[in-house]
């Protein structure tokens, strides 16, 4: 655990919706203020829309804490339910038994609770999280709950919170009556770079960081802001893994190299590309072993393998054309009466096949360059450092130039790796790192 290493009281980038760690960006502050005001003036129906990971549940907990003494509150998040299950869950959270499951009786019991809270001077606030998963029939039941009212006030304040799909659902023709009753729409937007820095500092401060030395460098923070898309949950994941890796490396300050490795580990698309390339390399290695082993064992045995190429299909076509061209260009005929001649001719044919099929690789090697693997280097990091991006095309070329490399995660310090001279704007960019403003070309690369 890195808490002792970085002198923190608690985990600063946890996954639970703790209101203490809520950072109020401009849109978070506006959304919270709007919901508080809507409840206080009794607007009835309100909604909160946000992308996954934006901290909407944490904000809702903060809202309920605000009304802890002045209102009766209920928080529902089990949205995969029928109308009867929904009403039963609502009454259960209120401490009311409803074993019979009769919808009319459940409505009556709920009305009694609401009237009791109203006479005691308390509001009733029901928050329904992940509301985008509710069936239309359940949403219709929720609409009917707004009919619990007196001549002056709504007895229930209902907040529907969910992902952008909730807005699409509320905009459908089937739910037009519910849509008309919603008087307040709040939303949360991703952080910009400045808000990301403030968010990181806020969580570190709550966790007990003394800030005597910078825990994240400026370049590391810029990469976190870019790699997280400004989504708090992504920021938490990146920072947690960065601190874990930094502790393992005994590194007091998290720099760009640590963040670069963390981003590579967390990038699902990159992991899929890496797995695909490893699988291709293993298949290629097996094919090479199958073809080369007979030649190494006995060059004359290579002739016995030639008929089997007819069973290989597309692989045979790629390998056989150079052999045909060699025969057309006057390759020597085999003298089966002279074993030495047979062996020599076999080696000649094999060499010509290899040379023809590898011509493209030889041409690539002649225009490539060699780098030496450094401690803690991975293929992903080397690719990003040398080409400012990591694409499928570049990684495939690296595998072609380094046929000895089967597993890209097994690089050892001191190994020489051949890299292609690839234009920086070619290939499909999986993700790209932009150097910080004002940084020199040396600062943009490895320090």
Image (cartoon, rainbow, N blue to C red):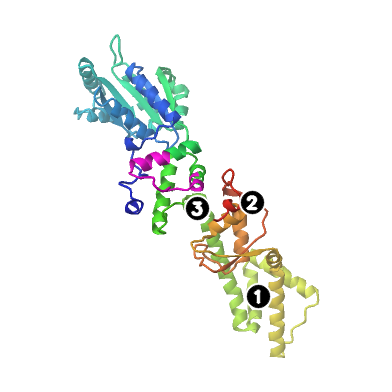
The spot of residue 245 in percent (x, y) is 42, 55
Q: Nearer the viewer, mark 3 or mark 1?
A: 3
Say which label, 2 or 1, has the lower sequence index. Answer: 1
Q: Is residue 202 magenta?
A: yes
Look at mark 2 in the image and give the residue it sits on: 427
Q: Is residue 251 magenta?
A: no
User: With 291 as the anchor, is 233 left or right in this view?
Assistant: left
- Farthest residue in the top direction? 151
Q: Nearer the viewer, mark 2 or mark 3?
A: 3
Determine the secondary structure under disc 3.
helix
User: With 359 as the anchor, is 178 left or right in this view?
Assistant: left
Q: CA distance from mark 2 to mark 1?
A: 39 Å
- Asked which quadrant contains residue 104, the reply is top left
Other residues around mark 3 within 10 Å, as few (<14) / some (14–19) / many (≥20): some
Q: Are marks 2 and 1 in contact (CB under 8 Å)?
A: no
The spot of residue 414 in percent (x, y) is 54, 69
Q: Nearer the viewer, residue 318 or 245?
A: 245
Q: CA distance from mark 2 to mark 3?
A: 18 Å
Q: CA distance from mark 3 to mark 1?
A: 46 Å
Say which label, 3 or 1, has the lower sequence index. Answer: 3
State the residue at coordinates (39%, 39%): 202
Q: Is residue 269 visible?
A: yes
The spot of residue 110 in percent (x, y) is 24, 22
Look at mark 3 in the image and give the residue it sits on: 264
First to last magenta residue range? 199-221
Q: Nearer the viewer, residue 431 or 251?
A: 251
Other residues around mark 1 within 10 Å, as few (<14) / some (14–19) / many (≥20): few
Look at mark 1 in the image and give the residue it sits on: 307
Above or below, comparing residue 40 to residue 419 in the picture:
above
Q: Nearer the viewer, residue 404 or 384?
A: 384
Above or below, comparing residue 178 to residue 335 in the picture:
above
């Amino acid at each position: 655990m890195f808490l002792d290493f970085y002198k923190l009281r608690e985990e600063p980038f946890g996954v639970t919706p703790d209101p203490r760690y809520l950072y109020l960006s401009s849109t978070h502050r506006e959304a919270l203020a709007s919901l508080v005001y809507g409840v206080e003036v009794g607007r009835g129906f309100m909604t909160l829309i946000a992308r996954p990971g934006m901290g909407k549940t944490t904000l809702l907990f903060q809202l309920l804490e605000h009304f802890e003494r002045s209102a009766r509150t209920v928080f529902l998040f089990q949205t995969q339910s029928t109308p009867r299950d929904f009403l039963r869950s609502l009454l259960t959270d209120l401490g009311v038994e409803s074993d019979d499951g009769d919808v009319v009786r459940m409505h009556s019991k709920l009305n009694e609770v609401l009237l009791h809270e109203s006479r005691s001077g308390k509001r009733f606030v029901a928050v329904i999280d992940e509301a985008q998963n509710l069936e239309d029939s359940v949403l219709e039941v929720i609409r009917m709950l707004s009919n619990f009212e007196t001549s002056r006030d709504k007895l229930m304040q209902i907040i529907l919170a969910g992902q952008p799909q909730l807005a699409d659902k509320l905009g459908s023709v089937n739910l037009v009556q519910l849509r008309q009753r919603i008087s307040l729409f709040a939303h949360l937007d991703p952080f910009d770079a400045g808000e990301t820095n403030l968010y990181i500092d806020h969580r570190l401060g709550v966790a007990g960081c003394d800030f005597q030395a910078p825990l994240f460098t400026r370049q590391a923070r810029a990469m976190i802001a870019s790699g997280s898309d400004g989504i708090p949950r992504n920021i938490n994941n990146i920072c947690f893994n960065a601190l874990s890796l930094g502790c393992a490396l005994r590194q007091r300050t998290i720099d760009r190299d640590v963040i670069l490795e963390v981003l590579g580990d967390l990038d699902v698309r990159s992991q899929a590309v890496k797995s695909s390339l490893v699988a291709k390399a293993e298949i290629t290695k097996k094919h090479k072993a199958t073809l080369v082993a007979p030649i190494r064992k006995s060059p004359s045995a290579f002739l016995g393998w030639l008929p089997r190429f007819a069973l290989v299909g597309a692989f045979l076509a790629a390998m056989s054309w150079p052999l045909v061209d060699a025969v057309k260009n006057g390759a020597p005929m085999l003298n089966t009466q002279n074993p030495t001649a047979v062996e020599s001719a076999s080696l000649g044919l094999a060499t010509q096949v290899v040379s023809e099929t590898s011509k493209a690789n030889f041409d690539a090697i002649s225009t490539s360059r060699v780098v030496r693997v450094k401690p803690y280097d991975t293929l992903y990091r080397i690719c990003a450092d040398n080409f400012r991006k990591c694409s499928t095309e570049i990684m495939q070329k690296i595998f072609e130039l380094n046929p000895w490399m089967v597993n890209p995660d097994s690089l050892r310090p001191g190994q020489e790796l051949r890299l292609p001279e690839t234009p920086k704007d070619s290939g499909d960019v999986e993700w790209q790192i932009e150097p910080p403003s004002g940084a020199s070309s040396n600062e943009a690369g490895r320090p």
